[in-house]
Each structure stands twice: as structure tokens, then as C-alpha cells.
Image: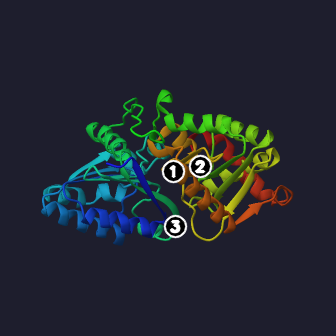
Amino acid sequence: MTDVETQFYTRTRDAWDIMLQDIDHAQKTIDIEQYIFTIDVIGERFLELLQEKARQGIQIRLMLDMVGSLGFYRSPMPELLRKNGIQVRFFNPISLWRIATLTFTSNFFRDHRKIMVIDGKIGHIGGVGIQDDMVNWRDTHVRTTGLLVQDIASSFETVWKQKGKNMMGSFKRTKQFVKNFNLLTNSPRPRQRYLYQALILNIRNAKKYIYLTTPYFIPDIRLFRVLRLAAKRGVDVQLLVPEVADHIFINHARESYFTLALKAGIRIYVYKGLMMHAKTGVIDDEWATAGSFNLDNLSLSFNYEANISTSDKQFIQDVKTHFLEDVQSSREIILETWIRRPLGKKILELLTWPFHGIM
């Protein structure tokens, strides 16, 4: 088995295509862990193919987050799949009265990871969900072969063995099968926020540049502080976010950070047109990461996440190239213009501050 080979897919449609192709070619096993799995046109394509593979005798396991895939959970589909030989579990089921009211606290301790493993030989990881309206989103999805797949498969197994329970403290630091690559997970337990700690460490050690792409920028105090300190010591810190987030309240919340960030010297770009859903970081041509991890408090402190982390030069160059190309399709926020935005907008941003810790 080769060390590690990776291939990027930067459009959701392309990621779906390669995922379906790998499922179609599966010989023994298919393991899928998803936050959002909707029974719509693309969801039906996946489900029809999975049922066909089950009829061929392939072992299939689906681990879906209950809140992210709520429509799936409420539908007759899980029982139908089980009757057809597919194992289906839902992560962290919540009580019926909370399902009915869809309370905000239902969003805590969710399995936000997007993982697929085929035959123990092919791994998929990234930010891509399975839902029709994501089809044209700009996202980052990684297909990998080689020894890193062992880490991805082991991480899936950890979740599966918990039978969908909220796994406070269940994750362990993954083994490093390959010198330059690692799978880093993040969980609600403070001592198991491996991805968060790696990000903080690399930002603190940065000397030249920090390029971060995230759909949701609502950092905790620590992360925001180290980013501003990096910019103030002369590091080129650049942040790429969607022009408009897919949740209006989150849009105001992320923009409430912009003035402080710009004054510290952080450059902010908003991606025009398509929804920017990629979650990547690259620092100093020395370290890069890609996966499901948002730069918001839900990912930092409450949800289960998984990213590839690496010092591999080709992976780093790919992430950097994607970032620089995306910047060309973006508009830079300029401090002098930003501070003249309407008063009403400033008030809406201010009103989000008490809620940042749970967003």
C-alpha cells in the first residue's frame, strides 16, 4: 500500500460523482458518516445505489446525525434500508418533544463529520453534505488512498461502536501511520480538541502567512486573539468567507468581528456568487488542513469534527492554490468603507454578541 495519495474536489457535484463511482465499485464494505443526508434527488441516487450494492452482498453501514438528517430520521427510509440489509444508526438521538419544537439546544453535540470508507482502501473526507440545494456550492472534498485510510476507518469505527450515543470523551488521538499526514478529530471534551489545538499552535508559530477559508466565522476569544496577534506581528493573515452565509443571524454574527479583525491587520475576502462552504487552512507552506471543521463555536467546542492535517508539500500547495484562486473571485472588505456601513447593520451585529459562545 502506498503512503498517501489525495485528490481534491472543489465543487459539490464533482464530489458526489466520485463518491457514487467509488460506491458503485465497492467489493466488500461501504461505511458512510454524514451530518446532512436528505431524501431528495441526490439522496435518492445514493440510496438506490446503496440498496443495489446491498443486494450484491456488500456490507453497508450508515451513521447519520439525527438533527442534520432529521427528515431522513422521521421517514420510513431507515426501516426500509434495514430490511434490505443496510445497517443504519443515528447519532445522539434527542427526545421527541425536542424534535417537535426543534429547540436551538438540539444543535449541540452533533456529529458534523463527513466521512466515507470503501473496502478499507479508499477514504473520503471534507465538507460536502448530501442535499440537492448544495449542488453548486464551492466546497472542499478530499479522496484519499493509502495508509491514511486506516485512520479514517478507525475513526468511523469509534463512532459506530458507540451506537449513536453522545460520545463525551470517546475519541482518542489517532495514530500517525504516515510521517506527513494525520487525521485530526475534535470533540466536546476539552482535552480531545486535537484539531483546535493544532490550529492554535500553527497560528502561533506562523511567520509568513495564514490563509483560512470558512463558511462560518464566529471564533472563540482564544482563536480570535491569536489571529489578531499574528497579524499585528506582521504575518499576512487572510480570511475567506461567503458573501452571504446561509443563515442570516450567523451572517450578522460573523460580521460583528470584522471591524476588530480589520483594525488588527487581518484581510477579509467575501466569495461572490456561489455559497462558499469549504473549511481549509494553510500556513507558511508548512501545514495545511481540510475537512468538516468550521471556525465557529459549534465546531470549536460542541460538535464532533474530522480533518486531514498535513505537512505534505503537494497537499499544502493544492490548498494554497485553491485559496488564491478563490480570492480572485472575491471582494475584499476595506476598513475605511466597512466602518461607514449603516447604523442599523451595526446594531444587528452588536445584538449577536451575547450568543457567540453558542453559535
Which quadrant of the figure has residue 200?
top right
Q: Which residue is mark 3?
A: 137
Mark 1 to mark 2 CA distance (whole Å): 7 Å
- Against 70, residue 221 (above or below) is above
Residue sitting nearer the eye, 79 or 29: 29
Residue sitting nearer the eye, 99 or 299: 299
Mark 1 to mark 3 CA distance (whole Å): 16 Å
Location of the C terminus (image quadrant) = top right
Crowding at label 3, few (<14), some or many (≥20) Cα neighbours within 10 Å? some
Circle on res. 37: none
Asked which secondary structure carries label 1, the reply is: strand
Nearer to us of marks 1 and 3 is: 1
Q: Amino acid at mark 3?
A: Trp
Please give the name of the residue rendered at 46% of the width and 70% of the height, measured from the top-left corner. Answer: 135
Query: In terms of sequence position, does the residue under pointer 3 or pointer 2 come before the other?
Result: 3
User: Residue 125 appears at what percent x and percent y?
Assistant: 42, 52
Q: Residue furthest top?
A: 191
Asked which secondary structure carries label 3, the reply is: loop
In the rendered structure, are the residues bearing label 1 and label 2 in contact, judged by CB atoms less than 8 Å apart?
Answer: yes
Asked which secondary structure carries label 2, the reply is: strand
Q: Which residue is mark 1?
A: 290
Mark 3 to mark 2 CA distance (whole Å): 18 Å
Which quadrant of the figure has residue 332?
bottom right
User: Residue 73 appears at what percent x and percent y?
Assistant: 30, 54
Residue sitting nearer the eye, 235 or 160: 235
Q: Which residue is mark 2?
A: 281
